[in-house]
Amino acid sequence: MRTRLTEHLNINYPVIQAPMAFAAGGALASAVSRAGGLGLIGGGYGDENWIDEQFTIARETKIGCGFITWVLREKPDLLQSVLSRRPAAIFLSFGDPAPYADIIHAAGALLICQVQTLKDAKHAIGIGADIVVAQGSEAGGHGEGRSTLPLVPEIADEIARTTPNTLLCAAGGIADGRGIVAALALGADGVVIGTRFWASSEAIVHPNFLAQAVRATGDETIRTQIADVVRGLDWPERYNCRVVRNAFIRRWNGAENQLSSELPEQTKLWHQSQESGDTNIATAIVGEAIGLINDVPDAASILNSLMTRAESVRTLL
């Protein structure tokens, strides 16, 4: 399936694997890239030792790395360290990418900016983002309130009016070939897929959370700030995080102030549960598309299935 994205990245399929913090390591990123997409290491909160380990695992595979942008402000040397690895792309989300655009381009990497609003898309276009990712609220992990279906064409129209060479990817709620074809129909050049690759054999996810998630439907996910409050992560107020509901989330959602008053006891409990795989406390960080997923194959099989279904759907249109 050829699109502007496949041509620009020299890949076989218009699929970028989302840089999910700590779940998307070198094994997953390299597997996606070898199978014909573009894989990304989830640099997330900037654990430099972990990131170095994952690049070593990926070896010389063409991959990129993603960051929560405001973390780079706290760790100014981290970006240059990763750029020394010569990644194909740097994926920035949830903060102002402007201070890093020239540095990334000077290193020969593509700048991918994930946005949740038209306003942020205009800013990303203005600083020279090579690829803008329109992320809808259906996505797993952090995001905002706009839905994928109207956000993607609104940004596509803005790109067509202002900078036609900028590429656009859709993200949020895409986990099978139908979603890929829909995204292309909306004006995207490709897709960014997280949850489907999160549920893969190469992802770094405790098997208990995988089992919890693949049993869940999209109805059982919720956008909340509980996961950030309990982990002591000072996220900007505009963002929240989509997770699978469990006993802990139901207990504290809407009672964030009370939860804050009971830290660090609850924080310790959460981290212990992450390590042990106690899904009554810690929980899977996935999107609404989890309702379309009921298995945990390898990444290459996932990508092949995605594209086979996409081609099948496309022939019916």
Image (cartoon, rainbow, N blue to C red):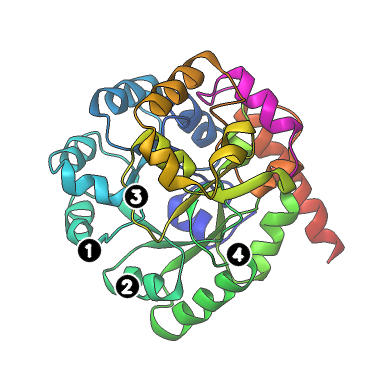
Mark 3 or 2 closer to N-term?
2
Name the residue: 53% across, 28% down: 282
The picture places residue 73, in percent across and down from the top left corner, at 18, 49
Residue 268 in view, yes or no: yes
Mark 1 or 3 closer to N-term?
1
Query: Label 2, on which residue?
Result: 123
Q: Amino acid at mark 3?
A: Trp
Alpha-carbon span between mark 3 and mark 2: 21 Å
Query: Label 1, on which residue?
Result: 98
Asked whether the beta carbons under mark 3 and mark 4 sit within 8 Å of each other, the answer is: no
Q: Which residues are magenta?
A: 201-217
Alpha-carbon span between mark 4 and mark 2: 19 Å
The picture places residue 105, in percent across and down from the top left corner, at 23, 56
**Residue 203 magenta:** yes
The picture places residue 221, in percent across and down from the top left corner, at 65, 45
Residue at the farthest bottom position: 161
- Count the labels in the image: 4
Mark 3 or 4 closer to N-term?
4
Q: Secondary structure at mark 1?
A: helix
Name the residue: 48% across, 55% down: 143
Mark 2 or 1 closer to N-term?
1
On residue 148, the disc is 4
Name the residue: 69% across, 41% down: 290
Query: Label 3, on which residue?
Result: 235
Disc 4 crowd rating (10 Å Cα; few below 14, some 14-19, many 20+) is many
Q: Amino acid at mark 4?
A: Thr
Q: Secondary structure at mark 2?
A: helix
Alpha-carbon span between mark 3 and mark 4: 22 Å
Q: Quadrant of residue 279?
A: top right
Disc 1 crowd rating (10 Å Cα; few below 14, some 14-19, many 20+) is some
Disc 3 crowd rating (10 Å Cα; few below 14, some 14-19, many 20+) is some
Residue at the farthest top position: 276
